[in-house]
Image (tube, rainbow, N blue to C red):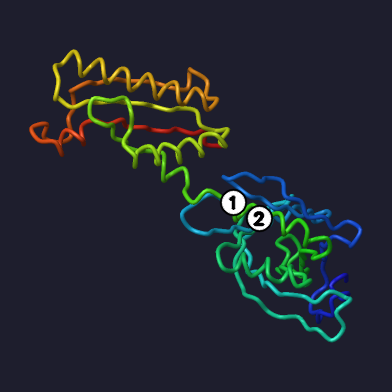
Amino acid sequence: MLLSLFAAPQTLAGRHYVATPAQSEWQVVVDTPLECRLVHGIPNYGDAQFSSRASKKINLDFELKMRRPMGETRSVNLVSMPARWMPGDVAERITQMQFFKQFDGYVGGQMAWALLSELEIGRFPTFSYRDWVNRDKQIEVSLSAVSFQNSYNQFSACIDNLLPYSFEDISFTVLNFEQGSEELNKPSQQRLTQIAEFVRYSDDIDLVLLATYSDSAQGTEVSQEMSEKRAKRLEEFFLSLGLPPDRIQVESYGQRRPIADNANPIGQAQNRRVVISLGRTII
């Protein structure tokens, strides 16, 4: 059994899946401010994949993508194995988990970071579980640390450049305008810049809904006209980001639907607003 190369004790006959040094390859397949993805092929088994996404929180997911999904839920041992060129080093148990029926194996959060740490020091994280087809067989799947470091450096740099907010953070946003102006106030301008950054790097935004409103400081016609001007300017802004016209919908409500009392400046400032709603394709 191949696991003997890593000096592990044998209890059951079975199969060990691992890339040979010549086969081992790590590749950053996604490198954007929205997502980073690092993939390692495991011959005859599938792929190992680390991914991190734009968010307010640091995050990391690991998936063991199997060509043949688990037919039964299995308890899985995760062990850090020394490479064969590490004489004297011993296997170290990391944790035990479950891989669920009909799903790829998943490891998240701190444990996913632990996998990266083991690979960085040249060890081989190894998943071990009872084969669901042949119950007397053991399946072992190892991540090879060979040729890991350069791609890991690129992956780490990508994570450092992820936007510090997610789609959920900007999918529904209320921005406010300066009085009697088509210009957003300073905080809203900063927020619009964040939305623009996300939209610019996304290929799955399929709807931008812009709904503009005004206060009642001026007459109904003037308020409606200002609302329409504000909507038109924002529409042009999103078109400049590369969105097709048919993905942008504009509604101008003027003085209608106030959310605050128009009798005072604070309420008027709240009513001078645009509501930006984003939709995205769900795969």
Name the foreground residue: 60 vs 275.
Answer: 275
Instruction: Say left or right for 100 vs 274.
Output: right
Say few, some or many: other residues with alpha carbon within 10 Å of mark 1 (under 14 / 14 to 19 / 20 or more): some
Say few, some or many: other residues with alpha carbon within 10 Å of mark 2 (under 14 / 14 to 19 / 20 or more): few
Image point 52% across, 20% down: which residue? 244
**Residue extending farthest bottom:** 88
| Residue 4: percent from left, percent from top | 87, 76
Name the foreground residue: 54 vs 107.
Answer: 54
Q: Specify the quadrant that holds the C terminus.
A: top right
**Residue extending farthest right:** 22
At label 2, the amino acid type is: Ala
Q: Specify the quadrant that holds the N terminus.
A: bottom right
**Residue extending farthest top:** 221
- Contact (CB < 8 A) between labels 1 and 2? yes
Image point 48% across, 35% down: which residue? 196
Q: Tell me the element at label 1.
A: loop
| Residue 32: percent from left, percent from top | 62, 44
Q: Identify the image quadrant of residue 204.
A: top right
At label 1, the amino acid type is: Asn
Name the foreground residue: 205 vs 260.
Answer: 260
Q: Is residue 273 above or below residue 167?
A: above
| Residue 178: percent from left, percent from top | 27, 32
Label disc, if present, on residue 281 of the rendered structure: none
Instruction: Say left or right for 48 vs 169.
Output: right
Q: Is residue 120 above or below residue 226?
A: below
Quickly name the residue at label 2. Answer: 157
| Residue 259: percent from left, percent from top | 18, 34
Q: Rounded to the nearest whole Å, what is the CA distance between mark 1 and mark 2?
A: 7 Å
Q: Is residue 220 above or below residue 43?
A: above
Q: Tell me the element at label 2.
A: helix
Quickly name the residue at label 1. Answer: 161
Instruction: Say left or right for 63 vs 137.
Output: left
